[in-house]
Image (cartoon, coloured by chain):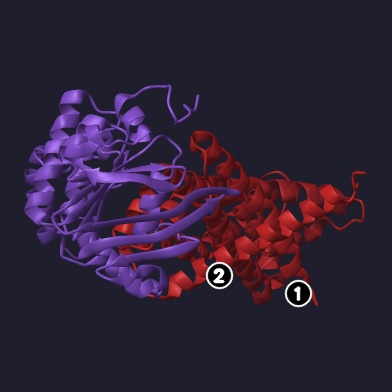
Chain colours: A red, B purple
Amino acid sequence: MINPFAPIGRGVLAGLAEIGRFAAFAGRSAASCFAPPFFLGQFLRQCMAVGYYSLPVIGLTAVFIGAALALNIYVGGARFNAESFVPNIVVLGITRELGPVLAGLMLAGRVSAGIAAEIGTMRVTEQLDAMTTLSTDPFKFLIAPRVLAATLTLPLLVLIADIIGVMGGYLVATYSLDFNGATYLRNTFNFLESQDVVLGLVKAAVFGFIIAVMGAYQGFNSSGGALGVGRATTNAVVGSIVLILAVNYLITAFFVE
Amino acid sequence: MTAKLQLIGIKKKLRGRQVLDGVDIDVAARRSLVIIGGSGQGKSVTLKCALGLMKPDEGKVLVDGADVTKMPPEIRARVMRKFGMLFQGGALFDSLTVWENIAFRLLYADKIARPEAKERAIEAMRKVRLAQEFADVRPIELSGGMQKRAGLARAIIAKPDILFFDEPTTGLDPITADAINDLIVEMVKELGCAAVSITHDMPSARKIADEIAMLHNGKIVWRGPTASLDTSGNAMVEQFVAGRADGPIQAVV
């Protein structure tokens, strides 16, 4: 007789094993960031690739979200005669939640997929093996620079996204909703607390780490040619997004409590 | 003659299948050993175990008498500096130029300054007869034969003690393949190193080998000098050398 719980058990065990492998990989990746040799050139190149070249997509996302948020809060606030809270809620929503989460999600698509595809291709074409035979640890040469670059540049991107997002709300509020510009900005800065920004930056750093490690993990363990690299890329994006959303809740809950 | 590289009783199981079942090989300095065998018989896994890319389940890998399987990673990395490897597809790094590929070990492991590393890369290119004008191009712009030459230059640049070749002539036309074989023989002689190659290209094996070993079902079933290949008296070797479908080895189709 077939045990109906066996497939469930197998699935749970496989899932736990995958989590364990990912945790070990993340630990090794983090350790590689702090142990010599360091490859400064690779790190700076990744800062450009991850940070600088992501600016347009992050900026566009932020400005449209800020603008849409202002409109929605205005409409919702009007039901309680609370339209004047638009600047307060826009800045709170952008800095604490939408800035880091949306930047993280955009980078999951752009950066995590890119890392998985690049490292995955290197795996299936034996370039990773070649690197090892050339006395160079792929964790130090490939993974550590990407993890460090993503962890350090995502908070900077989020800081920029916060400013652009608030300005998106400001533009809509002043040009469409008849807010006074000076009053809008004063309300924004008076309401904003440093911990709101810090929370967003902490989230961004964690999301950056997740994005780079997930991409590297999927790429490093890919197999089976082009199909395997495609699968690794998809898994990197999906895995990053799910982890970002789950960790976002945990960090928020921790800070709120 | 003292063995430069020795594999003793190597066993390796992959996805439940016993790929290597007690492989014993050894090769001395200035000698070239070629491992032949059909697809899926464990040739690549043998090479990966020898190179330290894969950890055997059982057995020893001795380099100059020291067991590398028991060494801590940092000491094993030092032993790896004695190795040079030519991969089947070249395995050149797409993001680097040809000279940076060739000088990779010098640039990133030995931390040699770029001007000196480039000079040595171009010297290695000259040795493998790859024109200097290709130094600054990306590997994707090279033909298959040129990529093999670049891979060979990368393998020899640090003057290794042991050279490994994974199917060095696969995918090349017969003339280019012969030129690569000549280069391999020349490099092994010039460097005075030990060489281990895996191939199922018999003309290539005859040209580059001092000794040939046949791997079948994860075991070395025959080993002897290249000259005795046609008089081995081993039915599996005879079938493989003749390229016949009928015989003790079942064709995998």
Q: How crowded is mark 2: few (under 14 residues within 10 Å), some or many (20 or more)?
A: few
Quadrant showing the N terminus of chain B = bottom left
Tag in front: 2 or 1: 2
| Residue at (23, 34) in percent of width and height | B231
Residue A128: x and y in percent read 39, 52
Residue B97 visible, this angle: no
Up/down of A237 relative to A139, above or below: above
> Answer yes or no: do the residues labelled 2 and 1 have beta carbons within 8 Å?
no
* Residue pointed to by mark 2: A27
Dot 1: few (<14), some (14–19), or many (≥20) neighbours within 10 Å? few
Residue B190, x across and y down, in percent: 7, 52
User: Which residue is disc 1 drawn over?
Assistant: A254
Q: Is residue B57 above or below residue B233?
A: below
Locate residue B161 relative to residue A150 in the image: left or right.
left
Name the residue: 32% across, 34% down: B200
In which quadrant of the rendered view does residue A45 lie?
bottom left
Mark sitting earlier along the chain (2/1): 2
- Secondary structure found at label 1: helix
Q: Which amino acid does label 1 sit on?
A: Phe
Left or right position of B198 against B123:
right
Foreground residue, A121 or B45?
A: B45
Chain under numbered label 1: A
| Amino acid beneath label 2 | Gly
Q: Residue furthest top?
A: B245
Q: Mark 2 lies on which chain?
A: A
* Residue B210 at x, y percent in the picture: 17, 45
Would you say A249 lies left or right of B58 here? right
What's the distance in space between the residues labelled 2 and 1, CA to CA?
22 Å
| Number of callouts | 2
Residue at image location 60% in from the left, 54% down from the top: A103
Viewer-closest of B59 and A155 = B59
Could you tell me which residue is drawn at 33 percent across and 74 percent down? B75
